Amino acid sequence: MSWLLVEGLLPLGIIAGMLVIAGNAQYHIHKAAHGRPKHIGNDMWDVAMERRDKKLVEQLSSAPSN
């Protein structure tokens, strides 16, 4: 019975290990290319809002203060 368990768990462990390696490779490649980790669930709206916020912050920081 124990050999049957080992025979089943070994391929599952290999598959799980390959999924972990693939996920980590994607993370590190994206981080190297863009300089920051990927935000999960970002769509075009979120990207547009990030650009808008960055632009507003830059405008406020460059505006003369009283």
Image (tube, helix red, strand yellow):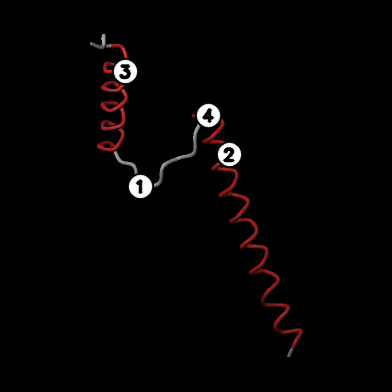
Instruction: Tell me where residue 7 appears, x and y as whole percent.
Output: 72, 77
Residue located at (30% from left, 22% from top): 57
Say which of marks 4 and 3 sits in front: 3
**Residue 2 sits in quarter:** bottom right
In the displayed structure, does residue 19 sit left or right of residue 11? Answer: left
Q: CA distance from mark 1 to mark 3?
A: 26 Å
Pointer 4 residue: 33
Instruction: State the CA–CA distance, disc 4 to disc 1.
Output: 19 Å
Query: Which element is circle 1 on?
Result: loop
Q: Amino acid at mark 1?
A: Gly
- Give the mark nearest the N terminus, 4 or 2: 2
The residue that label 1 is drawn on is 41
> In the figure, 40 relative to 16: above or below?
above
Q: Quadrant of the N terminus?
A: bottom right
Label 4 close to label 2 by CB (< 8 Å): no
Q: Say which mark, if any, is on residue 58.
A: 3
Secondary structure found at label 2:
helix
On residue 28, the disc is 2
Q: What x and y, as percent, mark residue 63?
A: 26, 11
- Residue 30: image location, x then y, percent: 52, 36
Q: Are marks 4 and 1 in contact (CB under 8 Å)?
A: no
Label 2 and label 3: CA atoms lie apart by 29 Å
Position of 36 with respect to 7 (left or right) is: left
Mark 1 Cα-neighbour bin, 10 Å: few <14, some 14–19, many ≥20: few
Quarter of the image holding residue 27?
Answer: top right
Residue name at image x 59 percent, y 47 percent: 24
Q: Earlier in the sequence, mark 2 or mark 3?
A: 2
Q: Nearer the viewer, residue 31 or 19?
A: 31
Instruction: State how far apart marks 4 and 2 are (Cα).
Output: 9 Å
Which comes before the other along the chain, label 2 or label 1? Answer: 2
Identify residue type, mark 2.
His
**What amino acid is found at the position of numbered circle 4 in the picture?**
Ala
